[in-house]
Amino acid sequence: MAQKNDKYTYRVTWSDDDNEYVGLCAEFPSLSWLAETPEKALRGIRKIVAEVVFDMNKNNEIIPEPISCKSYSGKFMVRIPPEVHRKLAIQAAESGVSLNRIASSKLSQ
């Protein structure tokens, strides 16, 4: 029942607790699927997401928008301790770049 145009964000990882692979979907954090191979875990989580989306449609519920389809401004505010702000400002000045460039560089690492 997995959708052909499924644009959700999936991840498959190993679970030591379950001794199996677990398939996850970022847009539906309460869902998961355990399987003995990564491929089966991905197929399983995609199937369960498709079933949940189908049920949500049927019940006129709001369906999460895929992260890949969202538009982002590139701006967000983050609060940091004043001493960290000062340290970053000094690094930026010494490097001859903006504070924004320093912060962006550190966040992308």
Image (tube, rainbow, N blue to C red):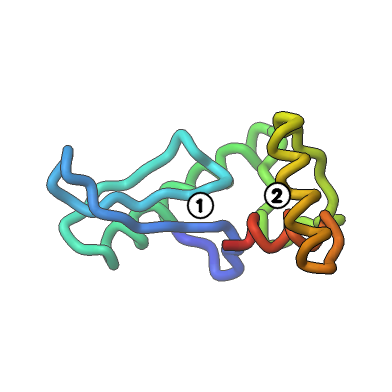
Q: Nearer the viewer, mark 2 or mark 1?
A: 2
* 60, above or below 51, in the image: above
Residue that lies at the very extreme toward the left in this rendered image: 19
Q: Residue at x 76, y 37 (%)?
A: 78
| Residue 60 seen in the current view | no
Quadrant hosting residue 31: top left
| Residue 64 seen in the current view | yes
Q: Are marks 2 and 1 in contact (CB under 8 Å)?
A: no
90 displayed left or right of 50: right
Q: Residue at x 66, y 42 (%)?
A: 57
Image coordinates of residue 27 in percent, x first then y, are: 58, 45
- For label 2, the crowd category at 10 Å Cα-Cα, with few meaning under 14, some 14 to 19 and many 20 or more, is few
Q: Residue beneath label 2, please?
A: 65
Which image quarter is the N terminus in? Answer: bottom left
Image coordinates of residue 36 in percent, x first then y, are: 16, 57
Image coordinates of residue 48 in percent, x first then y, are: 42, 47
How far apart are the two marked residues, 2 and 1, measured between alpha carbons? 13 Å
Which image quarter is the C terminus in? Answer: bottom right
- Residue 50 — which label? 1
Depth check, front residue: 107 or 95: 95
Q: Amino acid at mark 1?
A: Ala
Dot 1 falls on a residue whose secondary structure is helix
Dot 2 falls on a residue whose secondary structure is loop
